[in-house]
Image: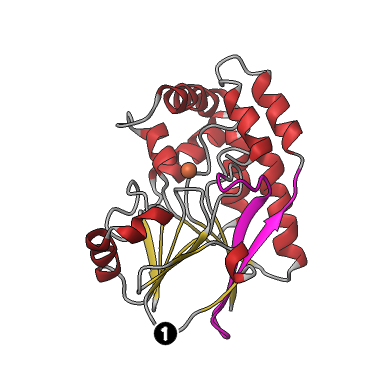
Amino acid sequence: MKRALISDIHANWEALTAVLDDIRQAGVSTVYCLGDIIGYGPDPCRCIDKVIATANVTILGNHDQASLFDPKGFNPVALQSVYWTRDQLDSLGTRSQINRRWDFLGELPRMHEEGEFLFVHGSPRDPTNEYVFPEDVLNSGKMEALFGRIELYCFQGHTHIPGVFTLNREFYSPEEIDYQFQLTGEKTMINVGSVGQPRDGDPRACYVILDEATGRVEFRRVAYGYSQTAEKIYNIDDLPDMLGERLASGR
Ligand SMILES: [Fe+2]
């Protein structure tokens, strides 16, 4: 079975629809969403409705959680977007649409396990909130603890920086491995990157196709109309302009 793994959509409708088109063209019909459907971006309700309609599995992200409960450790920009997002969720659509979105968010699991594959938003140790950055490979204690929590393979998002963490504490960005990684039978953590707010310097939307039969992991980058998304953000007073500006640089 082939699965498309998408994460960190962050209410970016243009990026989400471009990625879903690419997934369809790749002939993949199973989609797992690793969290943060909303937050930062201008189209939270549309993106939630699309994920409800499309994803076979969805995991709770910290921004999804922040819409439900008051967040801890959010910076002022993130917090401002949480309040605006909540307002949208409470006001757009019919009462039944509004209830359906809140029910969906409220019931999202924090992790999903299938055989040797674990799917989380953040990390195997703290599935919703812990960041695993490329430079963490220098922190052997952290790496040991994280790898100690996984059966074999863990797929995650949250940092918006795609790549592969190996058991011997190396990190490989998608470019370094020609956008492909062969699962080896050794423990591996893979960050699938971000659909709607990439932060690795490449503004194209990022996601992963996992082919279980061959053990092949493919990182895919999809160009989308980020200026359209940015324009929407600029036109919303409660969303800081920097949230639009960063889409062009992928930072
Ligand atoms: Fe995120």
* Magenta stretch: includes residue 203: yes
Per the image, label 1 sits on a secondary structure element best described as: loop
The image's colouring method is secondary structure
- The boundaries of the magenta stretch are 199-224
Relative depth, front residue between 98 and 159: 159
The image shows residue 174 at horizontal and vertical percentages of 59, 63
Q: Which residue is rendered at x = 47% and y = 54% of the image?
A: 157
Can residue 42 be seen in this snapshot?
Answer: no
Relative depth, front residue between 110 and 177: 177
Pointer 1 residue: 185
Q: Which residue is rendered at x = 73% and y = 69% of the image?
A: 26
* Magenta stretch: includes residue 180: no
User: Is 146 above or below relative to 44?
Assistant: below
Q: Is residue 187 shown left or right of residue 48?
A: left
Q: Which residue is rendered at x = 58% and y = 85% of the image?
A: 214
Can residue 28 be seen in this snapshot?
Answer: yes
On the rendered image, what quadrant is the N terminus found in? bottom right
Relative depth, front residue between 240 and 11: 240
User: Is 182 above or below relative to 164?
Assistant: below
Amino acid type at mark 1 = Gly
Q: Is residue 224 shown left or right of residue 58?
A: right
